[in-house]
Image (cartoon, helix red, strand yellow):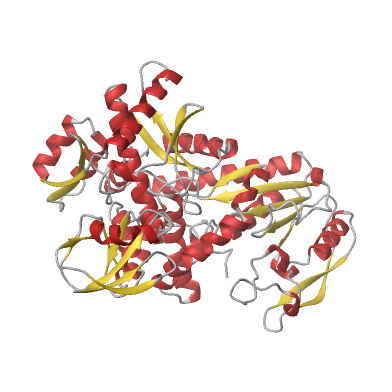
Amino acid sequence: MKIKLIKGPHEIITEVDAESGITAEELAGRYQSGLPYKVLAVTIDNKLEDLSYVIDRPCAVELLDMRSRAAKLIYENSLVMIYLKAIEETVGRVQVDVPNSLGKTLYTEIRTKEPLTDEMLGRIEKRMHEIVDADIPFEKETADREHAFEMLEKADLHEKKRMLEHAPDVRQVKYYSLDGFTNFFYGVMVPSSGYIDKFALQKYRRGVLLRYPRSADPSRLPDFEDEKKLYAAFGENKKWEKILGVSYVTDLNEKIGAGQEKTIIQLSEALHEKRIVEIADEILKKNRRLVLIAGPSSSGKTTFAKRLCIQLAVAGTYPLYMGTDDYFLEREQTPLDENGEKDYESFESLDTELFNDHMNRLIRGETVDLPTFDFLEGRKKYGRKTALKSGAPIVIEGIHALNVRLTAQVEDSKKYKIYISPLTQLAIDCHNRVPITDARLIRRIVRDNKYRGHSAADTIKSWNKVRDGEEKNIFPYTGEADVFFNSAHAYELCVLKQFAYPLLAEIPRSDEAYSEAVRLMRFLDFFKVIDADLIANDSLLREFIGGSIFVD
């Protein structure tokens, strides 16, 4: 039979012959030597499958390695299961939480009675390597609902049991076993433990970092970066969860079922506002004149910046709000990307000399004729003469706002830098988190459709390019920030679901975005719906679903 073989994200396509009944792993093995990285999974006619899948018809097969978002998550899940098995076999059956990513690692907490020692961690890591070297198969099995309840109870997986209790329509439960160790993950696994060949454990604060390769370079472990501010933001989020009374999706669903969604929304919004007030107070206390705000796509930068301006005004100042887009170079001066197109995301596309001159003059109290960039003509236009009130700050948002080169000529003592992102999301259970990038992608799907007329498939297919820009222009500079603002709302996926789900569901099987759409819908299936009419018009969430008083 004929197979259309797609060899990775750059779509090297060839037609090959294969016998009916061949597994995806056997097919991948025939071509692995010519590929840069190990194949971890496949899509069959745009549907994600593990490598045990039996191919019995002509189809299109895409080989996925760590550069693929789906394969990266498969590697994560498989690594976590090996980690959990090693902990049980060396430390005993204890609770292990995998609440979030921390920079380029997974942050985990092992709930031992005694403090975790270096010796204990060494035993866990040694056992993990032994499991990997043994190349033990991940065995996929199915249990009926009653049997699944028994297994979850026996394994002390109480949150997973609660999740199943709240899903009465689920009659069959898929799970994986690894040499007698059983757990439930919402996704597929690699064929065997030998596929997980790169990882390391590292003690960090109260937990353990589970380090593994990143999509940008699957050949090695990334260098360790101490994300102190991000860790502090997670600590703050734990306090917020305690106030809201929600730690897992099931907690939230139970409160919605009890009619408490209004309270959850009001508390979550109040926590956001309280944090914005605290940031505004710190800016004024330190007499910072240039407030610089950056964050990845769909972080809610515009709403946050304008709410911050309101709090600065309440304190008696009259802040100037502006973006960096008005300081683009003239179109003929704009650098080109690798495809020969104008690259407006490049730092070199900005007129930084003019920007620095204007910022310093405004801070000195001078009147400045600020530009407005005309995107139709591709040049700056003037006629916006502006002066600041005495002591008033300038609030600026832009993708390069944290890059030290943007404000190189402004004194550091005058600057206050803010990094904003939905830094946390409710976990499905103690071992299954909702990745932050997925939450941002769902926000963007809804916003792009609402304001730009883009389909969900369009947004999904452009997401890798967006992420590449973030890796280049935003994430390297987060360490410059004075403060991190967590723009996530605990309840937000319950609101976004009603907008995103129909958009994802309309993507046909023939579209290359189909497998990603299915994966996102599976996450959204865990969340009950909250009526969008309950969301205030000044909420950051309104930036995505519409009806915001801050966004046109």
The residue at the point 72 percent across, 65 percent down is: 348
Quadrant of the frame with the N terminus: bottom left
The answer, for residue 432, to whether it is visible in the render is no
* Residue 116 horizontal/vertical position (percent): 42, 20
533 or 342: nearer the viewer: 342
The residue at the point 17 percent across, 34 percent down is: 180
* Residue 323 horizontal/vertical position (percent): 69, 63
Residue 305 to residue 240: above or below: below
The residue at the point 64 percent across, 42 percent down is: 483
Residue 394 appears left or right of 345: right
The extreme top residue here reads 114
* Residue 365 horizontal/vertical position (percent): 89, 56
The residue at the point 74 percent across, 51 percent down is: 404
199 or 477: nearer the viewer: 199
74 or 114: nearer the viewer: 74
How many numbered discs? 0
- Among the 4 quarters of the image, the one containing residue 458: bottom left
- Among the 4 quarters of the image, the one containing residue 395: bottom right
Residue 513 appears left or right of 297: left
The answer, for residue 372, to whether it is visible in the render is yes
Residue 252 to residue 385: above or below: above
* Residue 439 horizontal/vertical position (percent): 43, 55
323 or 144: nearer the viewer: 144
Residue 544 to residue 318: above or below: below
Quadrant of the frame with the C terminus: bottom right
